[in-house]
Image (cartoon, helix red, strand yellow):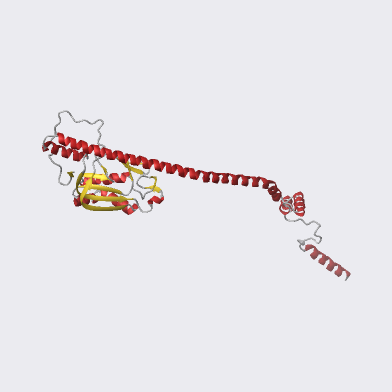
Amino acid sequence: MADDQRRSRDGSAGRADRREPSSTPADPGAGYRRPDASMLLLTRLMDHSLDEGYAEAAARRTAAGTTPGAAAGARHRPLLLLGLALVAGVLAAGAARQYTAAPIAEEHREQLMGRVEDETAAADRLQEQVDTVRAEVDAARRAALDGDELQERLALPELLAGATPVTGPGLSLVLDDAEGSEAGDAGVDPRSGTFGDAGRIRDRDLQRVVNGLWQAGAEAVSVNGQRLTALSAIRAAGEAILVDNTPLAPPYTILAIGDGPRVLDGFQTSADGYYLDALRENYRIRVESSVEPELRLPAASSLALRLAEPEAGAGGAVSPAPSASASKR
């Protein structure tokens, strides 16, 4: 029986020895190793990213009630105030200078306007003298010529050259800038590609209109009282339009002597007429046209030739009288 008990104890001990060992030892500190034990340095860096010395310094500043930003702001505040004072001083000086220069600029502007008006009045007086002398020369020439045949032969060349005033039926065309264009509604002008007001009439616009009237059958043309000849020039000087060096202001009244209905129809169906329609539709240029039973155009202001001379021995035939639509006055 004793042998049976001993065998039973030995069998139990064998079974106990064959059991699987526990994954966790009875004593945690005896032989246990963390899975991240090989990355201890990285773990400490992650858990304690701030050095203890920095943490202590931050704690002392917090306890004292001061921060680095506040200290730097306190040091830079005088410089900031000084900069603001300098900027304010510059702005105040500029405003004072502008306020002082405004009356002077206005005075200079008024002086220039006065000079322009005086020179314009002087030019008008000289033009009146030119017209008077031209009338005297014409009267003396007529008195010196014997018979009406020579006078009739000279009538047509003078008419075509614009040397004498003419009357007759024709067409009146008035062009004016778009409403509000004088207010400075500036932009890029599509007609020229330059900076300017597209709602204002340009010299090239008048050139095209005048050329279209000539092509449509006009026999004599004037713009704002300035008779156009073969030597006339329409050009721009700044914002002004000059006709034979005479500045013009809108509205621009173009008078064309000829068969009024025929001239108007021919102009409206031409490329220049379509161009004027485009100005009216796209840029709000104001256009008024009317057929007149009688118009009067003055003589051209200057017909001086500096280099052109008649060919020696040339004697082309000249019509004895002007056309029926335009007659010398």
Furthest residue in direction right, as rendered: 2
Determine whether, in the image, residue 106 is placed left or right of residue 162. Answer: right
Residue 29, placed above or below residue 100: below
Residue 31, placed above or below residue 5: above
Whether residue 182 appears in this view of the structure is yes
Determine whether, in the image, residue 54 is placed left or right of residue 292. Answer: right
Q: Position of residue 293 (x, y in %)?
A: 19, 52
Q: Position of residue 94 (x, y in %)?
A: 55, 44
Determine whether, in the image, residue 303 is placed left or right of residue 47. Answer: left
Residue 226 figure quarter = top left
Nearest the viewer among 123 and 42 is 123
Q: Residue placed at 70% from the left, 46% from the top?
A: 75
Furthest residue in direction top, as rendered: 312
Furthest residue in direction bottom, as rendered: 1
Q: Position of residue 25 (x, y in %)?
A: 79, 60
In the picture, which quadrant includes the C terminus?
top left
Nearest the viewer among 107 and 158 is 107
Q: Position of residue 148 (x, y in %)?
A: 11, 38
Q: Residue placed at 19% from the left, 40% from the top?
A: 159
Whether residue 230 appears in this view of the structure is no
Residue 163, placed above or below residue 199: above
In the picture, which quadrant includes the N terminus?
bottom right
- Number of numbered tags placed on the structure image: 0
